[in-house]
Amino acid sequence: MRRKSGRPALLIVDMLNMLDFDAGDALLKQAMPAAAKIASLKRRFKNAGAPVIYANDNFGQWHADFTEIVKICSGEGSRGAPIARKLLPEPDDFYILKPKQSAFHSTPLAVLLEHCGSRKVVITGISTDVCVAATAIDAHMRDLTVHVLADCVAAPTRARTVRALGMLHESIGSSLAASRSIRP
């Protein structure tokens, strides 16, 4: 039985990223419009006092902390710097570093959501067909209400995003709302 959704939490998945892989240029092109929408949505969540949580890959940097990851991804020489700079975390934002695709796998995210009183997650980020999808499926398995925002996610191609969004809607019933329709 699903519990009632409380305060929604905004999850920003892997938007702090060096994009230092073969499809990095393609993903940057697809993710820039999503980053602008996420920045606007983040402001709305913060103004409403709703939690904002960065769920970010640790890129195998087991000795790095979140601050170091932010610095690396937003620094000179990082292909993903334009996105990272647009979405820089603020001191009152929450964060978790994830070792695998899902933001729930081997992280304290479920405990953090409980602490925040959140039974609804609004998922944004990259890549729609990998980390976003894995996180959405894991959220669903935890009986959370899941919204994956169609205008706040990206994959290296638009076709991959469309396929992943369709799968999430059909398989777990994820809402695919646009960011403007979400109320923090």
Image (cartoon, grey):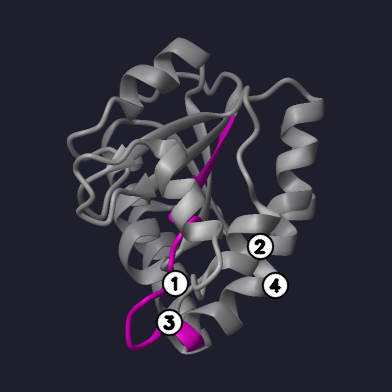
**Badge 3: few (under 14), some or many (20 or more) residues near its Cα, within 10 Å?**
some
Residue in the image at 47% along x and 24% along y: 119
Q: CA distance from mark 2 to mark 1?
A: 21 Å
Marks 3 and 1, Cα distance to the nearest angstrom?
Answer: 23 Å
Observer-nearest of 65 and 93: 65
Q: Residue flagged by tag 2: what amino acid is it?
A: Ala
C-beta proximity under 8 Å, tags 2 and 4: yes
| Vertical arrangement, residue 39 with respect to residue 158, above or below | above
Instruction: Name the residue beneath numbered marker 2.
Output: 35
Residue 78 in the image: state x and y as whole percent: 49, 70
Q: Give how far across and how far down residue 2 sits, in percent.
A: 38, 25
Q: CA distance from mark 4 to mark 3?
A: 15 Å
Residue 12, placed above or below residue 126 = above
Q: Residue at x 33, y 59 (%)?
A: 131
Marker disc for residue 166: 1
**Residue at label 3?**
24
**Foreground: 25 or 61?**
61
Please report contact status of discs 4 and 3: CB closer than 8 Å, yes or no.
Answer: no
Distance between mark 2 and mark 4 Cα atoms: 5 Å
Between 133 and 80, which is closer to the camera in this rendering? Answer: 80
| Of the image marks 4 and 3, the number of the one nearer the N terminus | 3
Tell me which segment is drawn in magenta.
Answer: 9-25
Viewer-side label of 4, 3: 3
Residue at (49, 40) in percent of width and height: 54
Which residue, as the protein is rendered here, is positioned at the far front? 76
Is residue 177 among the parts visible in the rendering?
Answer: no
Disc number placed over residue 33 in the picture, else none: 4
